[in-house]
Image: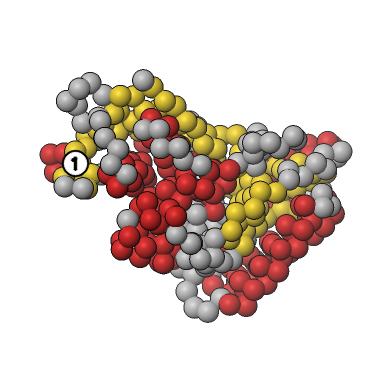
Amino acid sequence: MTVSCRAPGKLFIAGEYAVVEPGHLAVLTAVDRYATATVTAAEPGDGITLHSDLNGGVTLSCGRHGDELSPTSDAVVPASLSYVFAAVSVVHRLLLERAVPVSGFRLSVTADLGDADGRKFGLGSSAAVTVATVAALGQHFDLGLDSMDRYRLALLATIAVNPRASGGDVAVSTWGGWLAYRSPDRAQVAASLARDGVDATLRSPWPGLSVRPLPTPTELTLQVGWTGNPASTPALVAGLDGDRTTFRAHSNECVERLVAAIEADDAHAVRIEIDSARALLVDLDTISGLGIMTPRLRALCDAGAAVGAAAKPSGAGGGDCGIALIERTRPAAIAELTGRWLTAGIRPLPLRTHLAEGDPR
């Protein structure tokens, strides 16, 4: 039996730095680039084999040592399989807790979330890979996981690799569409996992967590530009030291207004809040010296302003992608924006929203 599940990539619309702190708000959208996980039952007597086509392709054989899953032959988990291995380990632990027989399988992961030369676009490939892996294993072992279960399992795997991850990318890769997201207290979740196990943690309260699907805007189109410079989100987030209470409060206010504007399908108000979110990031960059606003991201935003679009970095900045929101009824302005980006060395990415189930748009 073979099971395949895919999960979409993501773009942050606003709130990307504030959401790192529990209970703070961000808006994201899922995009039509995907990671796919395929699970195939192994031959009798065979163990667990993980394969990824990322970074040239790598394979890892795993075995059970007590209740833990670990690489065989003292192998080290390759970086390109770290999230896959973490996801498999979390689901494996859940299977043991539920007394589900664990037979051998081969899990293979593919993704189209980067350039042909392997450079990532910053579309949340780690989250998409993790979500797809959890979903495929859930189906393979008939675990009956709903969206919240899949999100929680994927976040447990994610924080095993990166404890500060907000999980926003995990959430939007799980639900799809546009999403308002508040992050849970990951330290408390990790403590619950260590104390009570996976199954109990799935069923326990996650303080701070909120997941709220949003309608896809009808009047605006989302244009995406890639700077050609991959950025390290964990490194940028780790550099954000000191008390940022005021920034987070202002960010929350901005994103709450943005959510209201999206729900009202008010294109003008959405663009105002995107501009406000960019201004907050510029101020944060000035104060912190993180390097959020690279020269190309500044050029991306300036090009947006020149044609009447609202533009900002998407995600941690320092490279990767920026976004611009502009009315669908202005094709000439969209074409001018694309031309300005190309002149500045910014590559437009032809991305569309991966709609949530039930979204009619």
Instruction: Report the side of 165 relative to 90 (left or right).
Output: right
Residue found at x 37% / y 51%: 199
Q: Which residue bears the numbered disc 1?
A: 64
Pointer 1: residues within 10 angstroms few (<14), some, or many (20+)? some
Seen at 26% across and 24% down, the residue is 42
For this rendering, which residue is in front, 43 or 231? 43
Secondary structure beneath dot 1 equals: strand
Q: Position of residue 314 (x, y in %)?
A: 61, 52
Q: Which quadrant is the N terminus positioned in?
A: top left
Amino acid beneath label 1: Arg
Q: In the image, residue 88 lies at what x, y percent?
A: 33, 41
Above or below, 76 relative to 205 = above
In the image as oriented, which residue stretches furthest toward the left?
Answer: 73
Q: Position of residue 164 (x, y in %)?
A: 43, 62
Q: Residue furthest front?
A: 99
Q: Position of residue 344 (x, y in %)?
A: 66, 46
Query: Residue visible at 56% across and 34% down?
Result: 33
Residue 228 in sight here: no
Q: Nearer the viewer, residue 123 or 346?
A: 123
Say if 44 sits above or below 300 in the image: above
From the viewer's perspective, is residue 195 above or below residue 225?
Answer: below
Whether residue 261 can be seen here: yes
Residue closest to the eye, 141 or 85:
141
Q: How is the image coloured?
A: secondary structure
Residue at 62% across, 78% down:
246
Instruction: Give left or right: position of 357 versus 110.
Output: right
Which quarter shows the C terminus? top right
